[in-house]
Image (cartoon, helix red, strand yellow):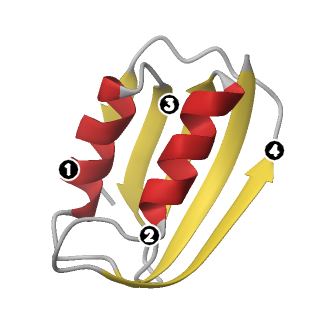
Amino acid sequence: MRHYSIKVKGKVQGVAFRFSTHAKAIKLGLTGLVKNMPDGSVYIEAEGSEDAINKLIEWCYVGPPRAKVTEVDAVEDEVKGYRTFELKRL
């Protein structure tokens, strides 16, 4: 079990990035959360297998069709024990 904190920058709000991330994470069997941040970025915490997290991080570089990702920062962190993958509001 791994935990990564991921920050995605660019045109990532108002383009269904959170909803798409939520769907992708569930498909990959990950737990955690995704939320928009006041600075215009999207913040993700993901827990699961290293392979599944790597697939999510790769996807974050592209995102949904209308997104324009400029930067993805992914940092391994302490496992928090999420049970589901939550879609959070700002």
CA separation, marks 1 and 3? Answer: 14 Å
Q: Which mark is residue 19?
A: 1
CA separation, marks 4 and 1? Answer: 23 Å
Q: What residue would you read off at disc 4?
A: 76
Counting residues from the start of the chain, the first of labels 1 and 3 encountered is 1
Residue 40 vertical placement versus 34 (above, below): below
User: How many neighbours does mark 3 have within 10 angstroms: few (below 14), some (14-19), or many (20 or more)?
Assistant: many
x and y percent of residue 2 in the render? Answer: 74, 26
The nearer-to-camera label among 4 and 2 is: 4
CA separation, marks 2 and 3? Answer: 16 Å
Counting residues from the start of the chain, the first of labels 3 and 4 encountered is 3
User: How many neighbours does mark 1 have within 10 angstroms: few (below 14), some (14-19), or many (20 or more)?
Assistant: some
Counting residues from the start of the chain, the first of labels 4 and 1 encountered is 1
Residue 61 vertical placement versus 5 (above, below): below
For residue 88, side relative to residue 2 (left or right):
left
Identify the element where label 4 is drawn.
strand
Quadrant in the rendering for residue 62: bottom left
Identify the element where label 3 is drawn.
strand
The residue sitting at 70% across, 22% down in the picture is 80
Disc 3 marks a residue whose amino acid type is: Gly
Q: Which mark is residue 37?
A: 2
x and y percent of residue 28 in the render? Answer: 41, 27
The residue sitting at 22% across, 65% down in the picture is 64
Q: What residue would you read off at disc 3?
A: 32
- Image quarter where the C terminus lies is bottom left
Query: Badges 4 and 1: C-beta atoms under 8 Å apart?
Result: no
